[in-house]
Amino acid sequence: MKREILAKLYQEIIKVMPMASSDIVVVNKGKVLLLRRTTNPLNGYWGLPGGGINLGETPKQAAVRELKEETGLVVSQDDLLGEKVFTHFNPGRQNISVTYAIRIKEAGIVLNSEHDKYTWASCVDGLPEPISSNAVEQINWALTNKEVIG
């Protein structure tokens, strides 16, 4: 009952105020890590690891936590490269995402229940569909950022 009330309250809040999140563009050998969502919003869409910033967390702390929760990858805040704020307008909601990038060498990905698949995608070979337009914008930023691509 309490969970249902909180879910309804959340749906009302996002109608009138933006939500804050942190996302990470994970780069490995020129490809980016994409996860396919199994939950709303954007159920069935490919996107980046990331999610809401909890009370008391910095955006970097949230990015590191979300990456571990969603993929099993453990990184340090010091490993994060670049920082860019994106404002996304989606039907019925607005999201402000602090986005980081990280380069990794090898990765054993372990997905949580929010995702059912992952892929390493290349902009050259084409990104999987459907993909969040937000993620495309964030990937383009990361792959044109000298700090990220080296």
Image: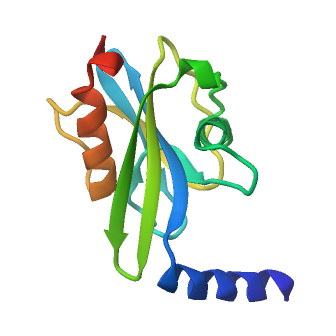
Residue drawn where x is 35% and y is 20% of the image? 148
Q: Is residue 57 left or right of residue 27?
A: right
Name above or below for residue 56 compared with residue 19.
above
To which quarter of the image does residue 77 belong? top right
| 77, 49: nearer the viewer | 77
Estimate the x, y position of residue 57 in percent, counting from the top left. Answer: 71, 47
The answer to whether one can see residue 131 in this image is no
Q: Is residue 122 left or right of residue 12?
A: left
Estimate the x, y position of residue 107 in percent, counting from the top left. Answer: 54, 20
Q: Which quarter of the figure is the C terminus placed in?
A: top left
Residue drawn where x is 26% and y is 54% of the image? 129
Q: Is residue 111 left or right of residue 57?
A: left
Name above or below for residue 95 compared with residue 77.
below
Q: Residue furthest right?
A: 2
The answer to whether one can see residue 142 in this image is yes
Name above or below for residue 7 compared with residue 86.
below
Estimate the x, y position of residue 55 in percent, counting from the top left. Answer: 74, 57
Estimate the x, y position of residue 126 in percent, counting from the top left. Answer: 17, 38
Residue drawn where x is 51% and y is 70% of the image? 40
Residue drawn where x is 51% and y is 25% of the image? 80
| 137, 4: nearer the viewer | 137
Which color scheme does this rendered protein use?
Answer: rainbow
Name above or below for residue 79 compared with residue 131.
above
